[in-house]
Image (cartoon, rainbow, N blue to C red):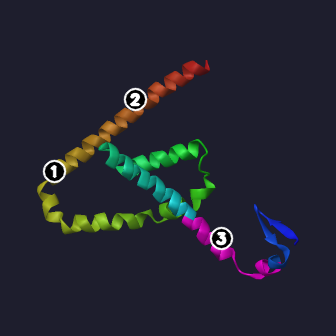
Amino acid sequence: MKTLRVGRKSCPFFLWSFVKVLPLRPFFKVGKMIRQCAILFGCLAVGEFVVWLTGITVPSSIIGMLLLTLLLKIKLIRLEWVKGMADFLVANLGFFFVPPGVALMLHFNLITGELWQIVVAALLSTVLVLISTGWVYQITDKIISKWRS
């Protein structure tokens, strides 16, 4: 029986005429989305497992994203494998802030009692982040300029 190469798979020639006609493109997109979700949620699940196993206080989502970054850097996962779902999640990021916003509105009476401490902490942490970022940039710039010369 004659076979026809289709990507990495081979298909009997008499079936290929039916496969060409069938509208299978949407199913391939669904398969890509499932793979993208599996990779992202798999990294998140590994992060959850690491937190459960070690008991560290770092959020599991941070560990999962660091793992995803590591897997992308060492090219164990290709960017194309997760790009579509990541773009979708970033494009709809505003929707993820709705539940915390509603919670803030529901518990506003608790927040008003501690409002000045929250404002002072936010301002102080913003100033400290700006100062430390500038300081790190200056040190890095000096090191790079010495290294280039």
Q: Does 19 appear in magenta?
A: yes
The part of the image, by quadrant, that contains residue 105 is bottom left
- Looking at the image, residue 62 sits to the left or right of residue 11; the answer is left
The answer to whether 38 is drawn above or below residue 144 in the figure is below
How many residues crowd around disc 3 within 10 Å: few (fewer than 14), some, or many (20 or more)?
few
Q: Which mark is residue 28?
A: 3
Q: Are marks 3 and 1 in contact (CB under 8 Å)?
A: no
Mark 2 — residue? 135
Magenta part of the chain: 17-34
Label 3, secondary structure: give it: helix
Q: Quadrant of the C terminus?
A: top right
Mark 1 — residue? 116
**Residue 20 at x, y percent in the picture:** 79, 78
Q: Amino acid at mark 1?
A: Trp
Q: Nearer the viewer, mark 3 or mark 1?
A: 3
How many residues crowd around disc 2 within 10 Å: few (fewer than 14), some, or many (20 or more)?
few
